[in-house]
Amino acid sequence: MEIFHLHRLFLVLVFVLGLGLPCFRAFGLLPVRSTYIVHLDKSQMPAHFQNPTEWHDHTLNAISVSPDQKIYSYETVTDGFAARLTAAEASQVHDLHGVIGVLPELRYKLSTTRTPEFLGLDKISALLPESDSVSKVVVGVLDSGVWPESKSFDDTGLGPVPSGWRGQCESGPAPRGFLDMDKPTNFTCNRKLIGARFFSEGYEAAIGPIDVSKESKSPRDDDGHGTHTASTAAGSAVEGASLFGYAPGTARGMATRARVAVYKVCWLGGCFGSDILAAMEKAVDDGVNVLSLSLDGGNKTHFYHDSVAIGAFAAVEKGIFVSCPAGNAGPRPYSLSNMAPWIATVGAGTLDRDFPAYVTLGNGKNFSGVSLYSWNFKGTLLPFVYAGNVSNATNGNLCMKGTLDPAKVKGKIVLCDRGVNDRVQKGSVVKLAGGAGMVLANTAADGEDLVVDAHLLPTTAVGEKSGDAIKSYLFSDSNPTATILFEGTKVGIQPSPVVAAFSSRGPNSITPAILKPDMIAPGVNILAGWTGAIGPTGFAVDDRRVAFNIISGTSMSCPHVSGLAALLKAAHPDWSPAAIKSALMTTAYVAYKNGGKLQDVATGKDSTPYDHGAGHVDPVSALSPGLVYDLTVDDYLDFLCGLNFTSSQIKNVALLARTKNHHCDPSKSYSLYDLNYPSFAASFDSTSGRPTTIKYTRTLTNVGAATGTYKASASSDSAALKIAVVPDSLSFSKAGEKKSFTVTVTGSAMPASTNAFGQLEWSDGKQTVRSPMAFSWT
Ligand SMILES: *[C@@H]1O[C@H](CO)[C@@H](O)[C@H](O)[C@H]1NC(C)=O
Ligand SMILES: *[C@@H]1O[C@H](CO)[C@@H](O)[C@H](O)[C@H]1NC(C)=O
Ligand SMILES: *[C@@H]1O[C@H](CO)[C@@H](O)[C@H](O)[C@H]1NC(C)=O
Ligand SMILES: *[C@@H]1O[C@H](CO)[C@@H](O)[C@H](O)[C@H]1NC(C)=O
Ligand SMILES: *[C@@H]1O[C@H](CO)[C@@H](O)[C@H](O)[C@H]1NC(C)=O
Ligand SMILES: *[C@@H]1O[C@H](CO)[C@@H](O)[C@H](O)[C@H]1NC(C)=O
């Protein structure tokens, strides 16, 4: 088994530079310990050990490491343990009996009133009469914890917790040092929030003890992110919700009657792989049906090194649907996270809701922006300055801490450029310098992508074009003035959805044969529950407390899909995670009602499958997809064989491969293109100079009417692609019946960086089963 030196070096650097540990550690005066996850093959456990834990401790003893260095033992989603080891000890461990892999722990980061109507969920009740079946579904959320007092977790009308639920409600001392200290008492669960646990050992081993004056060592959410994601997935309906009057209405999660179980793995200093794996173990053991993880480990993390992918494999094997964000690193290509095919990878789109706030200039010109800060300037034109002109700092235009000259800012509206530092922090800097308001202008890096924040002073955010026009006024007028007009909440914005610029984009950098993201869901300006521990901006200086907050990210789109998966699970308890994902994907839409194609904010043009995957989710259609592309965990093992993973790497990803003592069959050819995925992708070699042909084999399972004949139609947007489907007609005569077909795609010789797209539709005249196709020449 290989040790991944680069990652280890990176971890050490994170330690020293990022966490400010004493420098002498870096120079070897003391051994630097960091957390490794040691994967073991239990079938090789010597018989004289009573239980795996004893074996784990013995393994550490064998390299003269005290079992005190062990953080967790794992038995459900992997076999093995997490321990604090030096680099030398880590390489010794991997030579020991039964050890499959020794991998440095990774660090992960945390990447609604209107959404139910926007998604058509107000119509779903007719289609989903047995709402009781939803109350049997448990959505597990791994995040920053939960604020249990949030009304989104009110359990009115819910029956007893589902039988067989094995979760717990771990209490912990109430947090200290928060403003609203009368309220939060001990952490309690109810019939809505049926479980809550926290996992801090890996974090504390890496970072040091949790400072309970800053965050609570309990499942309580001191950040807000976890309360937001959990309430988005399955929050109860709360009437009269809003943020400062913005986005008013009834806030509700996607599956209002599903139960929520929260696993806190993210702390002020981040989320660590050993805690995530331990939380996934518990969630699987507790009996969740859906797992929602709004976390990402970046675009470089291969499956065998990724605790989320490893835990998800075991969860999927147990029939648990796992949903993760695509990441917020868009619009750059190859910016995706969470690319494993057994995970649902969700990008972000906008809603049809906006929060307009206009900048009117002294010359009478008027530019539209967005804002969540309601303020009435009564049309008064105030002196207006460019931050770059009222600062001595080289990057004065960015409104970094301490860079604005109060004498030149007081009482004025200040234009700050977006980028580098936090958007809300820029406003805080203007406010501290005595500014009256801020115009936050996008530069080329963000284009026309507008994201609202609960700023600390009257602010409007404008796109690049408006920002440039406003700046040319600022630079040419001798006495520039401006005012901001806040217009509240507007719904019915068209076109919507559009792909958010920040949403991470394909191609898939690990396995180009699998198109990612899988789909998009609402992730821009989403209203959902919030923590009572901190204000809506998350800044310590923000002493406002809100029950709901509006935030954006693929972290927000992921729990939308988790909640929808809970509804589908309730409607179709026998569907596998892959069938649920297929239903969501093949019924997703890629065009507006007027026929126009889904747009991308980043380009202002049509979006592609690298931006939106199969398209935007349409839950009502997903309830009856007609046909599904189903998959078993054995298919994923074949896929890993197709990736030429070593036996150890496969066993590292999949506990199943250990229990079955799985080996790839050298006489068999494993094609990545035969994974029965609901989309089609590949990368062509641009240097080959001749056409390349790829053959995909797929199988459809009839989950619709007992009998029917589906006809194929394939199309592409490029003469460089030729697509043939054989047979082009599939007749089904009973429910559950499976039929196979092949798709042959020939890509002409094209220069590198060419992309071409297509789609395959199977239709019986009523149901359309649509798959996207995406090809890139590299
Ligand atoms: C919280 O729990 C602690 C210990 O479990 C207990 O002593 C205390 O009385 C509880 N406080 C409230 C307000 O319930
Ligand atoms: C991953 O993202 C980095 C920037 O964060 C980028 O430079 C790199 O090209 C991406 N990786 C791949 C494999 O494309
Ligand atoms: C600015 O323009 C918008 C629409 O373009 C309009 O609704 C608004 O009233 C205008 N504001 C002013 C102050 O002219
Ligand atoms: C303000 O800054 C801009 C851009 O840096 C510059 O072009 C302009 O001359 C400055 N104006 C003043 C009055 O300094
Ligand atoms: C900026 O420069 C001026 C003089 O050029 C000086 O008076 C002022 O203190 C400087 N401000 C900051 C924030 O350094
Ligand atoms: C796996 O190895 C085979 C044989 O060397 C090769 O043809 C194939 O391209 C490899 N697949 C991948 C995904 O690297």
Image: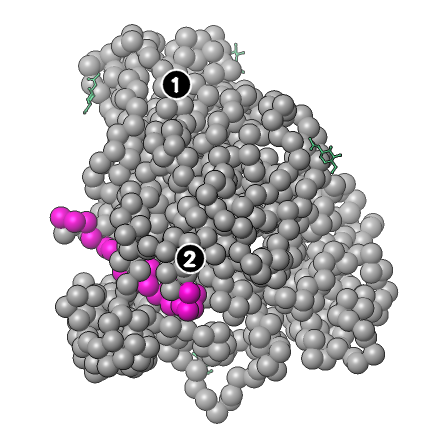
Position of the C terminus, as image quadrant, is bottom left
Q: What amino acid is found at the position of numbered circle 1 in the picture?
A: Pro
Residue at the image position 48 percent from the left and 92 percent from the top:
667
Q: How many marks?
A: 2
Q: Residue at x 48, y 34 (%)?
A: 151
Magenta stretch contains residue 592: yes
In three-dimensional space, the C-alpha distance between marks 2 and 1, rounded to whole angstroms, equals: 46 Å
Ligand 3 is within 8 Å of the C-beta of the residue at disc 1: no
Percent across and percent down for residue 15 are 68, 46
Q: Is residue 661 magenta?
A: no
Percent of width and height locating residue 126: 27, 52
Which disc, if any, is residue 133?
A: 2
Query: How busy is the neighbourhood of tag 1: few (under 14 within 10 Å), some, or many (20 plus)?
Result: many
Going by the numbered disc 2, the residue's amino acid type is Ser
Relative to 220, is 271 above or below?
Answer: below
* Image position of 218 (left or right of 300): right
The answer to whether one can see residue 254 in this image is yes
Give the extent of the magenta segment: 573-594
Q: Which residue is mark 1?
A: 458
